[in-house]
Image (tube, rainbow, N blue to C red):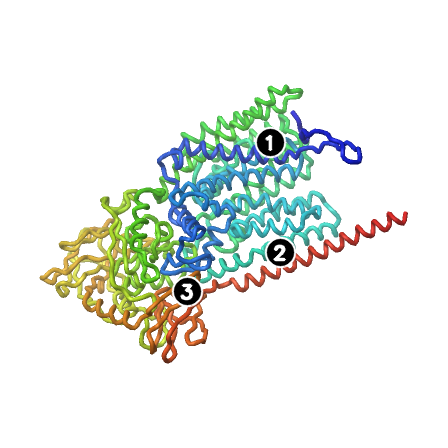
């Protein structure tokens, strides 16, 4: 078995000088990278076959945000690449009635791998995201295998196996597999460590900067964590090398400059995302709580799953080698102590609140508190490599590692994570230990035959693939049992898309994809221009405005739902609305089939002209969503009757009335008007006499509120009786829950707004132009949220757009005839300036370096001539 570089077979030929060239040795890093990529791909696919998961089975992969956010965002990217999207890279006209898109690109879609969606059919978007996920994971394994052999020479197959261990670590399988943009950080870490190696030797400075820039552009959130991890590895390498102080400072300076220039090149995107977070609706402020020691150790074992603990699994072979390192006498003491200390220090940093905050860029994550765990997984794999690269550990070291592993398993056995998955964990662990220790023991035999060595490698590979596949399959099943899930693209989505396409006439009017949505980002998935929008960057003004109008949301205000209401449809120029049957995949919804239908309404244009009024803010909204809708419409169209709730409900006027069992809500309205029920903190069903049953969904934790819903036409008696059937203890407003809409007054208001509104509206990527009737005066109002970045001009004067109860508003000069608004993502100008400065600096440094090299060459030629 060869431990050196394999010889590349090339025909030897004499060159023109008659000198027979020496054959160049092949780089074993290529073979190791290829092995890691192939093993990773095969393992992931095998795991999905075992789990019966898409695309190899009937179980969906689209759990949680993967189905709700990431797949729809990739679908919108597909539309952009094929020229079918409303908007462009700067602005998305389809979601949230108009939203900034570049921050979403920087958060979800800036990876070069994302562009691969364009080569798949539109109706295979789920397959495209799956292929991208597998490809990213395979590349991460290849990058780690390449890095290991760059750190120190060793067996290429061992580097390939350990590269696979890293790619299929617990963090990758449990978290990043359904957060595919995080996988770019998994790739970035070994690449940034390679950049650190280059700075140690002063090589490839330009390439190093480009690698940093690419990593920070692809996903700056995990790239930040990867950069910290790579910095720690570089620091350890410096300590172990112990160079003179001057050289150590030079290496540190080169590394800092490389990161600064690379991050600077990524600044146009990074600063846009940062600015987007400043204007986003505030999410939940997470509080860090360290997990118990037994839970922490349990996550080192295969087939244990938990969303809220660090997923540190790297495979038993890598774990045994890392545990053997402190006892491996062939490894220098300084190397043993250094790598062991670094692994322990980073492990402890995961459990301490201040360092956890530092790992997460000083912003407590909304969700898992251990998103940096992949860094520790990488360090465990690198420590394992030190055990292999210095020569395989002897029996003494392997025995000590086996004892430590047994103690670790004994402590982990007290964790509910191992008890819950005990029927998987212990059998898989025993088989993995047998494969790892058996393979390593066979390899350590002196004078071993090639057949024995081949069997040993087969044991190691088989154990690694088997336990990783089992872990991935268990993770898939556990996620489906604990999280919301969504069906991949199928007949329902195609039916929705066809209905939207048949009604779409943007920008003459908007087409809403519908109240019973398939995913939270339906407009990006199936088309149209709706209020639905789910992003970490959902704007504060949009969320607060729609909430004030009676809208519903989930994810603590960042996932906005469609509001099926004729007044808000008139305000936002929704001229067509798709009505879908409940999604049969969501079992909590009332089940019923039927086609998707479309209703149409006569609505004002996207730009209307209102009487001159002082600028307002969303704070000017009152407590009643009915009155707030009238503020935006400009006309009183609702009557708000007194309501009576049967029984003796508890509660007060401020917080609402508590109901925990069936109740009847009664009110009196003008016959023929349309009744609506607003009960944001009610959960259950509501049905008026003769009307359809409506579902209200909220929770006691405040993560979701229910939207206002129509109850039907008020009967001739004028009495509205609403049967409420709660599914939990809920609250119903004591006053103002029922509103009755005078549809004749609404039609009259629409006619006025149409008569004074724009005669023509055109839109582009962050641009809007409207022709106004001659002699228009007052305030032009654009039916789009007034998010930061809009500037408008009319009459030749440009100004920052004003605000009319959350919408874009522009005061008109006398006899205005047109309005032009342009959108510039906040942070883009500063980011472009920083990026340009970094690029100029890089060019200058490259030029100076080239001049110096040329001068040195010329000086050497003159000296040669002189001699």
Q: Residues within 10 Å of mark 2 (few under 14, many from 20)?
A: many
x%, y% of residue 806?
36, 67
Q: Can residue 265 be seen at all in this image of the molecule?
A: yes
Q: Can residue 293 be seen at all in this image of the molecule?
A: no
Structural distance between the alpha carbons of marks 1 and 2? 35 Å
Figure disc tally? 3
x%, y% of residue 124?
39, 42
Left or right relative to 822: residue 832 = right
User: Tags 3 and 1 in contact by the CB under 8 Å rule?
Assistant: no
Dot 1: element:
helix
User: Tags 2 and 3 in contact by the CB under 8 Å rule?
Assistant: no
Q: Is residue 172 above or below residue 703?
A: above
**Residue 606 or residue 33, whichever sits in front:** 606
Residue sitting at 77 percent across and 53 percent down? 854
Who comes first in sequence, dot 2 or dot 3? 2
Q: Residue furthest right?
A: 867
Dot 2: element:
helix
Q: Which mark is residue 158?
A: 1
Q: Is residue 6 above or below residue 179?
A: above
**Residue 359 or residue 621, whichever sits in front:** 621
Frontmost of labels 1 and 2 is: 2
Left or right relative to 113: residue 647 = left
Q: Which mark is residue 787?
A: 3
Residue sitting at 42 percent across and 61 percent down? 764
Q: Which mark is residue 45?
A: none
**Residue 445 or residue 563, whichever sits in front:** 563
The residue identified by callout 2 is 261
């Amino acid at each position: 078995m060869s431990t050196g570089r394999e010889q590349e077979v090339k025909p030897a030929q004499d060159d023109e000088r008659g000198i027979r060239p020496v054959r160049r040795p092949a780089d074993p890093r290529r073979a190791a990278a290829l092995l890691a990529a192939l093993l990773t791909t095969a393992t992931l696919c095998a795991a999905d076959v075992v789990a019966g998961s898409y695309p190899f089975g009937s179980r969906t992969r689209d759990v949680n945000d993967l189905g709700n956010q990431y797949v729809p965002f990739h679908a919108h990217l597909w539309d952009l690449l094929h020229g079918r999207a409303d908007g462009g890279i700067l602005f998305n006209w389809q979601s949230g009635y108009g939203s900034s898109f570049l921050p979403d690109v920087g958060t979800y879609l800036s990876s070069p791998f994302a562009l691969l969606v364009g080569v798949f059919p539109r109706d295979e978007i789920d397959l495209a995201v799956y292929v991208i996920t597998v490809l990213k994971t395979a590349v991460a394994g290849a990058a780690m295998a390449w890095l290991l052999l760059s750190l120190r020479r060793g067996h290429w197959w061992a580097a390939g196996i350990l590269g696979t261990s890293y790619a299929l670590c617990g963090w990758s399988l449990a978290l990043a597999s359904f957060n595919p943009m995080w996988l770019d950080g998994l790739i970035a870490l070994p690449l940034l460590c390679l950049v650190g190696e280059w700075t140690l030797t002063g090589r490839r400075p330009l390439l190093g900067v480009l690698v940093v820039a690419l990593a920070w552009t692809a996903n700056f959130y995990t790239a930040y964590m990867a950069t910290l991890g790579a910095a720690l590895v570089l620091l350890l390498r410096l300590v172990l090398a112990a160079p003179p102080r001057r050289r150590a400072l030079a290496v540190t300076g080169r590394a800092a400059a490389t990161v600064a220039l690379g991050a600077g090149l990524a600044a146009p995107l990074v600063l846009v995302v940062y600015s987007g977070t400043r204007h986003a609706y505030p999410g939940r402020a997470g509080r860090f709580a360290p997990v118990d020691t037994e839970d922490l150790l349990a996550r080192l074992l295969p087939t244990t799953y938990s969303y809220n603990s660090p997923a540190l699994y790297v495979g038993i072979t890598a774990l045994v080698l890392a545990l053997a390192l402190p006892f491996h006498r062939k490894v220098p003491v300084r190397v043993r102590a250094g790598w062991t200390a670094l692994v322990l220090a980073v492990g402890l940093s995961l459990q301490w609140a201040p360092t956890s905050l530092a790992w997460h860029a000083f912003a407590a994550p909304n969700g898992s508190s251990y998103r940096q765990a992949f860094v520790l997984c990488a360090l465990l794999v690198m420590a394992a490599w030190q055990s292999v690269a210095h020569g395989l550990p002897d029996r003494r070291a392997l025995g000590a590692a086996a004892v430590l592993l047994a103690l670790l398993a004994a402590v982990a056995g007290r964790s509910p994570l191992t008890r819950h998955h005990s029927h998987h964990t212990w059998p898989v662990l025993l088989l993995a230990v047998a494969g790892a220790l058996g393979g390593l023991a066979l390899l350590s035999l002196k004078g071993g035959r090639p057949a024995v060595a081949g069997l040993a490698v087969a044991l190691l590979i088989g154990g690694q693939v088997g336990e990783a596949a089992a872990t991935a399959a268990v993770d898939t099943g556990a996620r489906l049992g604990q999280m919301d899930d969504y069906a991949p693209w199928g007949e329902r989505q195609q039916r929705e898309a066809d209905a939207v396409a048949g009604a779409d006439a943007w920008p003459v009017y908007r087409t809403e994809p519908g109240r019973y949505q398939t995913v939270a980002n339906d407009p990006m998935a199936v088309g149209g221009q709706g209020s639905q929008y789910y992003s970490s960057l959902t704007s504060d003004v949009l969320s607060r405005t729609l909430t004030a109008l009676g809208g519903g949301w989930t994810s603590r205000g960042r996932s906005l739902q469609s509001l099926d209401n004729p007044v808000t449809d008139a305000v936002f120029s929704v001229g067509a609305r798709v009505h879908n049957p409940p999604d049969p995949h969501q079992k909590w919804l009332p089940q019923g089939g039927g086609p998707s239908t479309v209703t149409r309404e006569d609505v004002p244009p996207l730009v209307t002209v209102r009487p001159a009024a002082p600028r307002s803010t969303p704070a000017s909204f009152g407590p009643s969503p009915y009155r707030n809708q009238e503020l935006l419409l400009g006309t009183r169209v609702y009557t708000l009757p007194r309501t009576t709730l049967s029984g003796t409900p508890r509660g007060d006027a401020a917080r609402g009335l508590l109901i925990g069992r069936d109740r009847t809500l009664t009110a009196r309205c003008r016959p023929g008007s349309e009744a609506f029920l607003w009960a944001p903190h009610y959960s259950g069903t509501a049905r008026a006499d003769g009307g359809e049953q409506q579902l209200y969904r909220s929770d006691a934790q405040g993560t979701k509120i229910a939207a206002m819903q129509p109850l039907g036409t008020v009967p001739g008696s004028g009495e509205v009786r609403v049967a409420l059937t709660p599914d939990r203890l809920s609250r119903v407003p004591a006053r103002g829950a029922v509103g009755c809409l005078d549809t004749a007054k609404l039609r009259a208001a629409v006619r006025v707004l149409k008569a004074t509104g724009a005669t023509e509206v055109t839109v582009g990527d962050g641009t809007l132009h409207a022709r106004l009737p001659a002699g228009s005066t007052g305030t032009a109002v654009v039916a789009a949220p007034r998010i930061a970045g809009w500037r408008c001009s009319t009459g030749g004067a440009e100004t920052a757009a004003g605000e009319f109860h959350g919408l874009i508003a522009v005061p008109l000069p006398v006899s205005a005839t047109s309005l032009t608004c342009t959108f510039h993502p906040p942070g883009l100008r500063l980011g472009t300036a920083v990026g340009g400065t970094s690029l100029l600096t890089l060019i200058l440094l490259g030029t100076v370096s080239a001049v110096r090299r040329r001068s040195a060459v010329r000086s050497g030629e003159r000296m040669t001539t002189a001699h």
